[in-house]
Amino acid sequence: MGCSFLTRPYQTFDIDTSADVETAVLLLVVGLIVSQLAARARRLEVITVTDADHLRRIHETAELAQSAKSSDTVVDHVRGQLTEVLSLRACRFEYGTLMGRPPRLEQDGNVAVGRRHRDVDIDGWPDGEIELRTYGNGHYLGRFMLTPGPGPVPPLQARLVAVTLADQTGAALDTAGPVKDG
C-alpha cells in the first residue's frame, strides 16, 4: 500500500505491519491538527486586521466630527466610509424629514422591512435602498440612503460599524447644524 518513510523497510511506501498502520494514522492525525491550527491562525489574523480597520474608521470619524468646521465634511467622509464598509453601489445623505418607508438598518445591525426583521445573513439585502438614520440628542436629523452592491451582505460587525459611523454624523450635525447650499 505505502505511506511511511519512518519504519522498515526505510525509503518505501509499504505498510506491512500494524506498527506501520499506526505510524501512518498518527502522521495523518498530526497533519490534520497542524492544518486546522494553521487555518484557525489565518482566520484570527483576518479578524484582527478587520477589527483594527473598523476601529481606525470609527476613530478617524470621531476626530473629524470634533474638528470639522462643517458637518457636510463629516457627512461626505461617512458616506465614503459606509460605501467601503458595506460594499455599497451608492450612498447618499438626506437632511430633514422622513419620506416613504424603505427598509431600515437598525441600531443592532439588523434590517427592518416594515414591522418585520429580515435575516439579511440568510436572505440577503432587501431590494432597493435601505435607510440608516442619524440622530443627535435623540432628534432625527437625516438619513443615509444605502444602495447595496453585488455580493454577500457584510457581516454583523461591519453593519454595527456602519451604525456607529452614522451616530458620529448625528453628533456632528447636532453640534454644527447642516450647511445648506444656497
Image (cartoon, rainbow, N blue to C red):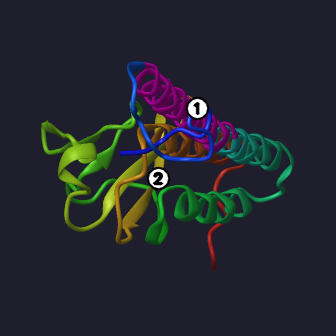
Image point (64%, 48%), residue name: 173
Tell me: 27 left or right of 45. Answer: left
Magenta stretch: give its range.
Answer: 19-48
Density class for disc 1 (Cα within 10 Å; few <14, some 14-19, many ≥20) is: few
| Residue closest to the eye, 111 or 153 | 153
- The location of residue 53, given as percent across then percent down, is 70, 47
Q: Label 2 belongs to which residue? A: 142
Quadrant of the drawing holding the N terminus: top left
The vertical placement of 106 against 132, above or below, is above
The vertical placement of 79 against 2, above or below, is below
Q: Quadrant of residue 182?
A: bottom right
Q: How many marks?
A: 2
The vertical placement of 146 against 176, above or below, is below
| Residue closest to the eye, 164 or 68 | 164
Q: Secondary structure at mark 2?
A: strand
The three-letter code of the residue at mark 1 reads Val
Tell me: 89 left or right of 41. Answer: left
Image point (77%, 40%), residue name: 59
Q: Label 1 belongs to which residue? A: 34
Q: Main secondary structure of the magenta part?
A: helix
Q: Secondary structure at mark 1?
A: helix
| In this rendering, the label closer to the viewer, 1 or 2 | 1
Q: Separation of disc 1 and disc 2 at Cα?
A: 51 Å
- The location of residue 87, given as percent across then percent down, is 48, 64
Tell me: 113 left or right of 146. Answer: left
The three-letter code of the residue at mark 2 reads Gly
